[in-house]
């Protein structure tokens, strides 16, 4: 820069120098002008270099510190609900349905009347059986008296031995006829009772397939209605034999401890993702693997006092299978995978430098991964701020409470939670921002 450019850049001082040139000698004027030019250049250079010399701020990132904890390993298995008891109601006698004696969908008790079948013919059959029994009993009394007289007469040879024996045989036959008549009467009374169809079990009754006036036959294939007992309920679910074998290997290797107890608690998760409020217990564990699906069938017995569970619902059974004594749980959002699917995390070292670390994961437990290898207790794993830092960068780790964050995000009507690592950075940016001139 020459003297004229300096004068153009700093007008007042250049004008002052021009004024001084009119009062001083040429030599002095030249020296003063040179000093003023150097001062102007230094001032302008200092103002332009100040932003470039400012140090780059260290980004803040959210981390979680890994802590060993005792963790129960649950197997989430798909299943279906089954009624504890189911009864299909069918007629045992033929006839015309006169009345339906229940409300569809209501709760019925065992022995409660459900249908009334026209019993006129059955009543007539009963009356005929009563008369047949009376006739057989009268014949028995007559033959018995005759046999008693013949027994006295045979002693004095008033009758032959053959007549005596025939009289005794007639009594035995008459007694048999009385027994047959009694059985016929019992059958008639049973059929008459069956004309009033009763509930074989207590429970909730389904829709009726017939209406009054319909003809029904004994032991027909179509059920009149169905009754299901829904408290308690069965939950049938399946477990892969491959997972079961791997679990046994993990237990044998000492990675997990076996869950003991004859009554293993089973938690139920509904189809909408909510947890069922009542806890069941394992009632049956299959011993044969299905050759087409490769799974074992298990059954849990679950209380259902509120009637929330209904037969045929899709649910998930959370079955405790093992216990990890010193488990390291890693938030799923901290894990990234390369093109081959290999998982890795960013670890904040003691000096604040990020290190990329390959890890081995065992299984997912809710929103976390169970770490099998690659990390140690006490290490800080990055969970927020991936857009502000990369491996090798120096960062300022800020601890994040993942549980509180998840609870805040799960509440409806609240704005999304800003990461704990983002909040300080946003505040710092707002503080450092300069107001517009």
Image: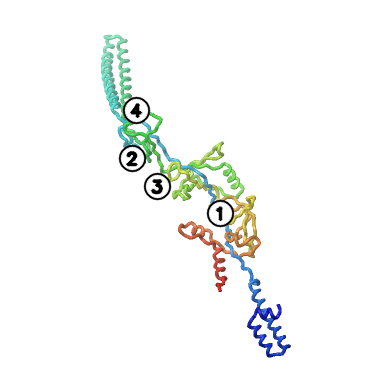
**Is residue 425 shown to the viewer in this render?**
yes
What number is the disc on residue 368?
1
Q: Position of residue 134 (x, y in %)?
A: 26, 22
Indicate which disc, 2 or 4, sits on the residue closer to the N terminus.
4
SS class, disc 2 = loop
Q: Which is nearer the N-term, disc 3 or disc 2?
A: 2
Mark 1–mark 2 Cα distance, whole angstroms, equals: 50 Å
Give how far apart the Cα atoms at labels 4 and 3 are: 38 Å
Q: Nearer the viewer, residue 387 or 246?
A: 387
Residue 306 image label: 3
Q: Which residue is mark 4?
A: 94
- Whether tag 3 and tag 1 are in contact, CB under 8 A, the answer is no
* Coordinates of residue 355 in the picture (x, y in percent): 65, 60
Nearer to the camera, 21 or 376: 21
Q: CA distance from mark 4 to mark 1?
A: 64 Å
- Between disc 3 and disc 2, the foreground one is 2
Q: Which residue is mark 2?
A: 103
Measuring 56% from the left and 42% from the top, which residue is drawn there?
240
- Relative horizontal placement of residue 172, taking residue 237 as reference (left or right): left
Say which quarter of the image contains residue 400.
Answer: bottom right
Quadrant of the drawing holding the C terminus: bottom right
Look at the image and tell me whether residue 378 can be seen: no
Indicate which disc, 3 or 1, sits on the residue closer to the N terminus: 3
N-terminal of the two: label 1 or label 2?
A: 2
Helix, strand or loop status at disc 1: strand
What kind of colouring is applied to the model shown?
A: rainbow
Please rate how many residues cluster around mark 2, counting C-alpha atoms within 10 Å: few if below 14, some from 14 to 19, many from 20.
few
């Amino acid at each position: 820069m020459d003297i004229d450019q300096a004068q153009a850049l700093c007008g007042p001082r250049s004008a002052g120098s021009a004024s001084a040139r009119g009062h001083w000698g040429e030599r002095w004027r030249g020296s003063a002008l040179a000093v003023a030019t150097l001062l102007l250049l230094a001032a302008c250079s200092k103002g332009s270099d100040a932003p470039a010399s400012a140090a780059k701020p260290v980004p803040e990132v959210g981390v979680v510190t890994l802590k060993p904890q005792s963790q129960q390993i649950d197997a989430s298995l798909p299943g279906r609900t089954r009624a504890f008891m189911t009864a299909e109601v069918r007629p045992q006698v033929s006839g015309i349905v006169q009345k339906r004696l229940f409300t569809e969908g209501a709760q019925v008790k065992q022995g409660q009347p459900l249908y009334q079948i026209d019993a006129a013919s059955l009543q007539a059959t009963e009356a005929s059986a009563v008369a047949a029994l009376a006739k057989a009993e009268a014949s028995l009394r007559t033959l018995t008296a005759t046999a008693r007289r013949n027994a006295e007469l045979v002693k004095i040879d008033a009758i032959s031995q053959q007549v005596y024996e025939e009289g005794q045989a007639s009594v035995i036959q008459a007694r048999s006829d009385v027994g047959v008549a009694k059985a016929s009467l019992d059958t008639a009374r049973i059929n008459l009772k069956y004309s009033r169809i009763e509930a074989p079990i207590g429970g909730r009754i389904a829709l009726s397939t017939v209406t009054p006036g319909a003809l029904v036959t004994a032991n027909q294939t179509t059920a009149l209605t169905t009754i299901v007992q829904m408290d308690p309920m069965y939950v049938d679910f399946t477990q892969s034999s491959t997972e079961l074998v791997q679990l046994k290997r993990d237990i044998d290797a000492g990675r997990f401890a076996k869950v003991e107890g004859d009554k293993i608690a089973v938690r139920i998760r509904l189809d909408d993702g909510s947890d069922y409020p009542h806890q069941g217990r394992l009632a049956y564990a299959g011993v044969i693997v299905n050759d087409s699906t490769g799974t074992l069938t298990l059954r849990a017995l679950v209380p259902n006092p509120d009637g929330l569970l209904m037969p045929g619902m899709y649910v998930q059974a959370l079955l405790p299978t093992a216990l990890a004594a010193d488990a390291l749980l890693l938030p799923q959002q901290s894990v990234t995978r390369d093109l081959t699917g290999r998982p890795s995390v960013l670890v904040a070292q003691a000096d604040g430098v990020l290190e990329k670390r390959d890890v081995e994961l065992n299984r997912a437990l809710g929103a976390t991964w169970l770490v099998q290898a690659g990390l140690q207790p006490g290490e800080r794993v990055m969970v927020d701020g991936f857009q502000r830092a990369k491996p090798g960068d120096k960062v300022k780790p800020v601890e994040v409470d993942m549980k509180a964050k998840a609870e805040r995000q799960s509440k409806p009507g609240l704005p999304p939670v800003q990461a704990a690592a983002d909040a300080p950075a946003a505040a710092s940016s707002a503080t450092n921002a300069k107001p517009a001139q």
